[in-house]
Image (cartoon, helix red, strand yellow):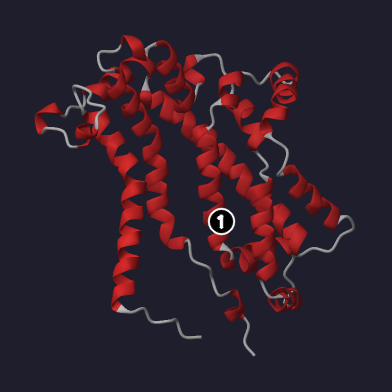
Amino acid sequence: MKAMKLSRGQAILRGLVLAVGALAFLFPFYYMIIGALQENPDTSLAGAFPQPGNLTLANFTAIDSRINLVSGLVNSGIFTGGVLLCTVVFGVLAGYSLAVLQWRGRGATFALALLVQVVPFQLLIIPLYVLIARDYGLADSYLGMILPFAINSTAVIIFRQYFLQVPRELFDAARIDGAGDLRLLWRVALPLVRPALVTVILVTFIGPWNEFLWPFLITKQADMQPLAVSLANYISNVAATAANPFGAVLAGALVLAAPVVVLFIAFQRYFTSTDIGSSVKG
């Protein structure tokens, strides 16, 4: 089906609308960068266009001297990396099982995964804290931070939907050649669902990287807290005494947001659907 060709006026209008939307989306990031670099804060609109002499890296030094940005980044990286690893491994296995394997209770299990989506995590905070901190003794540990997020029902659903699109003929042909389920998953299914892998990684990354409530409850030692928790503590307790609290807070927010932006830019080209059906001829 041929795409409808836009007239010159429609093309110009579409370009203008997209440009305005892009500027509206990017301006907060630009303002955060400028605010983090300003020596003397200017919260007015004119502050978005500062004088070169008013730009400095002192705000990063000021906040780093109070909360140790490197340590916070490392803790956030370990926390997020552990959640990502568990989410991908368990999500792939569960999604493959729900989409490809035939077993009793498969439909009820998928319905349960959908039901979990409507249960707010905040309702589970107290029982999870009692279980992990008191019963398991995992307070102030990376494992204690990771466990509640190890299995992500959204990832399971995403992988299931992608695996359902893989033609059954591919699995049948591989089974005829003597391949088992793990080999089918590794050699046949996973290479065809790379967009799902990237989607799950990016969607999952943002959650634990910005997570505040659970790490705040489970960690009491400052050297174990992720950057989001350290930054929140800085804003509540220390920022008011800083020479430039506005710039220091924006500097911390910039350090927290930068990895997410870089990750999205690096992997955005993978956000394309693959023509899975082209793997089968005839």
Question: Can residue 140 be seen by looking at this rendering?
Answer: no
Residue designated by label 1: 197
Q: Residue at x 44, y 14 (%)?
A: 236
**Rendered view: 183 above or below 35:** below
Name the spot of residue 46 as percent of width and height, x first: 19, 33
Name the spot of residue 72 as percent of width and height, x first: 43, 25
Q: Residue at x 41, y 62 (%)?
A: 269
Marker count (numbered): 1
What amino acid is at disc 1? Answer: Leu
| Quarter the C terminus occupies | bottom right
Quadrant hosting residue 56: top left
Q: Residue furthest right?
A: 104
**Rendered view: 112 above or below 271:** above
Q: Is residue 113 left or right of residue 246?
A: right
Is residue 121 or residue 44 the one in the foreground? 44
Quadrant hosting residue 15: bottom left
Is residue 136 or residue 124 the one in the foreground? 124
Q: Residue at x 25, y 23 (%)?
A: 59
Q: Secondary structure at mark 1?
A: helix
Q: Residue furthest top?
A: 241
Name the spot of residue 179 as percent of width and height, x first: 72, 70
Q: Is residue 133 left or right of residue 60?
A: right
Is residue 182 or residue 76 the one in the foreground? 76
Quadrant hosting residue 49: top left
**Rendered view: 59 above or below 51:** above
Badge 1 crowding class, 10 Å Cα cut-off, few under 14, some 14 to 19, many 20 or more, is many
Q: Residue furthest front?
A: 9
Q: Is residue 77 left or right of residue 242?
A: right
Is residue 12 or residue 237 the one in the foreground? 12
Name the spot of residue 83 as percent of width and height, x first: 58, 39
Question: Can residue 201 be seen by looking at this rendering?
Answer: yes
Q: Residue at x 90, y 58 (%)?
A: 104
